[in-house]
Amino acid sequence: MASGASPVSYGSDRAGLICGFVFSAEGVARPVDSEQAEAWLRGDDPPGFIWLHFNAANAATNKWLEGHFDLSDEFFEALREGVRSTRIEYAGLVAGAMVFMTTE
């Protein structure tokens, strides 16, 4: 008997993405995986905004970010070394923000 429930996944996908959401201009969110996020970044979807939560400990994360965003060396340095600031800082993104969270 099929339950119709979505399969449960744990951890991050092949790109290091733990979870992601695309928000429409009306504020409606839908979950996306890394392939769907790539399509959204190419402009395949209507305008809105995307929230991507990556696992910084996954080696694939840096490669995916480097391949999809024009980020500064300072960004990747902060990712490698960890951020001790509690303030949001400009990271060179035109329509987005990067937020670092640690458990330290």
Image (cartoon, rainbow, N blue to C red):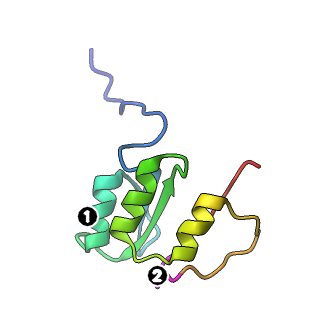
Q: Secondary structure at mark 2?
A: loop
Looking at the image, residue 85 sits to the left or right of residue 39; the answer is right
Which labelled disc corresponds to residue 95?
Answer: 2
Nearer-the-camera pick, 68 or 35: 68
Nearer-the-camera pick, 9 or 45: 9
Q: Are marks 2 and 1 in contact (CB under 8 Å)?
A: no
Image coordinates of residue 42 in percent, x first then y, are: 25, 72
Could you classify mark 1 by the number of other residues whose Cα lies within 10 Å: few (under 14), some (14-19), or many (20 or more)?
few
Residue picked out by circle 1: 39
Q: Secondary structure at mark 1?
A: helix
The residue sitting at 42% across, 31% down in the picture is: 8
Q: In the rendered structure, which amino acid carries the disc numbered 1?
A: Ala
Question: What is the CA distance from the residue labelled 2 to the residue labelled 1?
Answer: 16 Å
Nearer-the-camera pick, 15 or 76: 76
User: Which residue occupies the extreme left position in the image?
Assistant: 44
Q: In the rendered structure, which amino acid carries the disc numbered 2?
A: Ala
Magenta part of the chain: 92-96
